[in-house]
Every structure is written in structure tokens, then in C-alpha cells.
Amino acid sequence: MFKTLVWATDGSAAADRALPCLRSLAGAGGTQVVAVHCVEFVIGPHIGGLPVHFGQTELSAKIEQQVAQLREDGIDARLEVLGNPGDGAARTIARAARDVGADLIVVGTRGRSPTLELLLGSVTQRLLHTAHCPVVVVPLGTEPPA
């Protein structure tokens, strides 16, 4: 049914909660999954003039492992790690989805930073307004399928 799905992930529990839904939608054959992770630049302390990415190494490793597991399970999956050039994560994800010809974007409802969400608005909320294709939003309280 779907040729290309995008899983927008920040490595949070909410993004992880969307993974079973993604697996179900991808099915057993022919659907490509592109995991999109936006590296967020932290405003504030810098080391040697470079922005600090707290926990980025661990997050990237976790997401790479999740994508590898999708491949092991027979799903054609790959990871795109994108910088966030000040356009915002939602626009970056929407642009990536358009670039890969996504039929659908799967995302969780709440990411790593509730404080930033209150100040800047939810990435998921913004994605609903900027994506060129349908967006499936998986609530944090959703129980994954057995």
C-alpha cells in the first residue's frame, strides 16, 4: 500500500512508541522506511567555538540500532541524520519526506523537551501543518501491539 514511509525520531520514548505502528504499516514487502533524525543544536555553552550536542552520540547509536533491527526483520530501512539549519525540525523532516517521496510520516506526540515544546511549539504540531503527505501521530500513552 505504501511505497515509502518516514519515521521521524528524536530517540525519545514517544518516537520509540511509534515504531510498532511503523512496522505494522511497512508490512512484509516492498515498503521502504526512511528514519529521519534531526540533530538539534543546543543554544548556550560551546566548546572550542562548536555547539554542544548533549547525548547525540548515544542517541545516534540507539537509532542506528533500531534501523538495523528493522533491516534484520526484513524491512528495507535506512537512516538519514540531518542538521537543523535554523529552519526548525518540523520543516527539516517535511523537506526530507518530500525529497524521498514519502507517502506517509509516522511520528510520536511528544519528544525529549517538554520545556522547549511549551516555548516553541510541538514539532509534531508543526509537522502536521508543513508535511506534503499524511502524518500518523502515535500518542505517548498508546500500548504497542503485542
Image: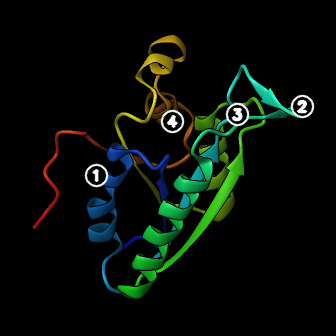
Cα gap from disc 4 to disc 2, whole angstroms = 31 Å
Disc 2: which residue: 49
Q: Who comes first in sequence, dot 3 or dot 1?
A: 1
Disc 1: which residue: 17
Q: Nearer the viewer, residue 55 or 13?
A: 55
Q: Which of the labelled discs sits on residue 41, or is there none?
A: 3
Badge 2 crowding class, 10 Å Cα cut-off, few under 14, some 14 to 19, many 20 or more, is few
x and y percent of residue 111 in the render? 42, 36
Q: Nearer the viewer, residue 40 or 52?
A: 52
Q: Which of the labelled discs sits on residue 114, or is there none?
A: none
- Residue at x 51%, y 28% (from the top left corner): 126
- Residue at x 42%, y 82% (from the top left corner): 75
> In the rendered structure, are the residues bearing label 1 and label 4 in contact, judged by CB atoms less than 8 Å apart?
no
Q: Residue 97 is drawn in which quadrant?
A: bottom right
Q: Nearer the viewer, residue 54 or 66?
A: 54
Badge 3 crowding class, 10 Å Cα cut-off, few under 14, some 14 to 19, many 20 or more, is some
Q: Who comes first in sequence, dot 4 or dot 2?
A: 2
- Residue at x 10%, y 67% (from the top left corner): 146
Three-letter code, disc 1: Arg
Disc 4: which residue: 127
Q: Who comes first in sequence, dot 2 or dot 1?
A: 1
Q: Residue 20 is drawn in which quadrant?
A: bottom left
Three-letter code, disc 2: Gly
For residue 85, side relative to residue 42 (left or right): right
x and y percent of residue 115 in the render? 45, 17
Badge 1 crowding class, 10 Å Cα cut-off, few under 14, some 14 to 19, many 20 or more, is many
